């Protein structure tokens, strides 16, 4: 009796194996007849998911100046994005204790700056500063060159870049207009994906 049961089980297993080889799973699945249109939809969905995951890794923060200052190293280059015009330029931090003193790195970036400052000297400009690929900081730019210049960039003077709770050098106070521009930039932080 046990021999017959074993033989029946072997026959059943062999039959299932042959059947599975002839008709691969899923035999009754809706996806056995995937059309070219279906494949395009699937591919687009996957690409959208990947883009969303990449975008979600980017943070735009409003950090206190005491936190930002060590991140924004003196002598290093960073990208600044003007919120109103979408202009991207590269600058170097040259110093600054109460806020960052910066200059465009070369004449090409100075020319980009000229587009920002056209007809609006001393305006506080809401902007973003890229610290690394995943981190942007909301900031405010005094867009008129003044004081000393240290770079050969076809510009006389430097610019002041303010962050949350940063102060002016002359009066040593927190400038309300800068703080307003920083808050505005932070509220508009979702635009960063259109500007980078």
Image (cartoon, helix red, strand yellow):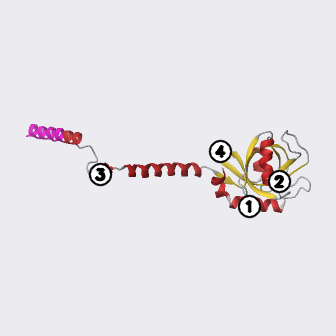
Label pair 4/3, CB-CB below 8 angstroms = no
Q: Position of residue 9 (x, y in %)?
A: 15, 40
Q: Earlier in the sequence, mark 4 or mark 1?
A: 4
Secondary structure, magenta segment, majority class: helix
Q: What whole-number distance in Å separates the C-alpha atoms at marks 1 and 2? A: 18 Å
- Tag of residue 133: 4
Q: How many numbered circles does the render carry?
A: 4
Disc 4: CA contacts within 10 A as few (<14), some (14-19) or many (>=20):
few
State which region is magenta: 1-15
User: In the depicted view, which residue is nearer to us: 133 or 7?
Assistant: 133
Magenta stretch containing residue 90, yes or no?
A: no
Q: What whole-number distance in Å separates the C-alpha atoms at marks 2 and 4? A: 25 Å
Q: Earlier in the sequence, mark 2 or mark 4?
A: 4
Magenta stretch containing residue 14, yes or no?
A: yes
- At x 87%, y 58%, the residue is 173
- At x 29%, y 51%, the residue is 29
Say which residue label 2 marks: 143
- At x 65%, y 57%, the residue is 191
Q: Earlier in the sequence, mark 3 or mark 1?
A: 3
User: In the depicted view, which residue is nearer to us: 163 or 32?
Assistant: 32
Label pair 2/4, CB-CB below 8 angstroms = no
Q: Earlier in the sequence, mark 4 or mark 3?
A: 3
| 3 or 1: mark nearer the eye | 3
* Residue furthest left in the image: 1
Disc 3: CA contacts within 10 A as few (<14), some (14-19) or many (>=20):
few
Q: What whole-number distance in Å separates the C-alpha atoms at marks 3 and 1? A: 54 Å
| 2 or 4: mark nearer the eye | 2
Quadrant into which the N terminus falls: top left
Q: Earlier in the sequence, mark 1 or mark 2?
A: 2
Check disc 1 and report its element: helix, strand or loop. Answer: helix
- Tag of residue 183: 1
Say which residue label 3 marks: 29
């Amino acid at each position: 009796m046990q021999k017959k049961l074993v033989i029946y089980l072997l026959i059943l297993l062999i039959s299932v194996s042959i059947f599975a080889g002839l008709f691969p799973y899923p035999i009754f699945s809706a996806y056995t007849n995937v059309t070219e249109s279906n494949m395009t939809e699937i591919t687009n969905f996957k690409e959208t998911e990947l883009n969303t995951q990449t975008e979600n890794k980017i943070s735009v923060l409003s950090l206190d100046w005491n936190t930002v200052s060590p991140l924004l190293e003196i002598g290093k280059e960073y990208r600044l994005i003007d919120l109103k015009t979408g202009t991207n330029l590269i600058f170097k931090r040259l110093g600054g204790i109460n806020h960052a003193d910066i200059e465009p790195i070369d004449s090409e970036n100075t020319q980009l700056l000229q587009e920002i400052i056209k007809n609006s000297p001393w305006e506080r400009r809401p902007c973003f500063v890229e610290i690394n690929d995943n981190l942007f900081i909301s900031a405010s730019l005094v867009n008129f060159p003044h004081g000393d210049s240290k770079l050969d960039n076809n510009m006389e003077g430097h610019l002041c870049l303010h962050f949350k709770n940063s102060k002016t050098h002359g009066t040593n106070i927190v400038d309300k207009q800068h703080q307003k521009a920083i808050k505005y930039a932070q509220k508009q932080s979702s635009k960063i994906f259109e500007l980078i």
